[in-house]
Image: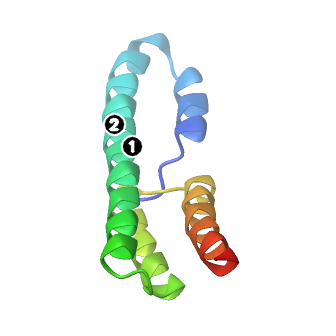
């Protein structure tokens, strides 16, 4: 799956002729559901990795993000959200 940006895809669908929109929206909804599932699963994998080994290096967690990103087509914004989640963990850990 290539990069899937829901906002860009919706903008593209709005420009389609009416008779093509219904099918395009069905495909969009399927991709969006799979991507959201992938984002949630990625977060769980990150959390479990940290839970299993609190010393898991940032690079190892980012490798997980890269794998999920390749499979589910995360866009830059979604990757940035995940990166902030990881950075937040390391920031809070450093404060302790």
Q: x%, y% of residue 71?
A: 33, 63
Nearest the eye: 55 or 35: 55
Q: In this view of the protein, can residue 1 be seen by the observer?
A: no
- Give the residue number, with chain letter if any, for mark 1: 36
Q: Secondary structure at mark 2?
A: helix
Pick the quarter of the image with the C terminus.
bottom right
Q: Secondary structure at mark 1?
A: helix
Distance from disc 2 to disc 1, alpha carbons, whole Å, reads 5 Å
Pick the quarter of the image with the N terminus.
bottom left
Question: Dividing the picture into quarters, in which one does residue 15 lie?
Answer: top right
Q: x%, y% of residue 83?
A: 59, 67
- Give the residue number, with chain letter if any, for mark 2: 33
Q: Is residue 21 above or below residue 11?
A: above
Q: Is residue 19 above or below residue 89?
A: above
Could you tell me which residue is drawn at 32 percent across and 67 percent down?
A: 48
Q: In this view of the protein, can residue 13 be seen by the observer?
A: yes
Farthest residue toward the top?
18
- Pointer 2 and pointer 1: residues touching (CB < 8 Å)? yes
Could you tell me which residue is drawn at 38 percent across and 47 percent down?
A: 35
Q: x%, y% of residue 93?
A: 59, 76
Q: x%, y% of residue 9?
A: 53, 37
Could you tell me which residue is drawn at 57 percent across and 32 percent down?
A: 12
Q: Give the number of the disc on residue 9.
A: none
| Lateral position of residue 72 relative to residue 17, left or right | left
């Amino acid at each position: 799956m290539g990069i899937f940006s829901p906002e860009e895809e919706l903008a593209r669908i709005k420009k389609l002729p009416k008779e093509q929109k219904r099918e395009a929206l069905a495909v969009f909804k399927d991709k969006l559901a799979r991507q959201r599932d992938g984002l949630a699963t990625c977060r769980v994998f990150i959390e479990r990795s940290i839970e299993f080994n609190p010393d898991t290096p940032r690079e190892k967690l980012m490798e997980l993000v890269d794998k999920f990103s390749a499979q589910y087509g995360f866009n830059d914004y979604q990757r940035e959200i995940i990166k902030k989640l990881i950075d937040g963990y390391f920031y809070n850990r450093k404060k302790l």
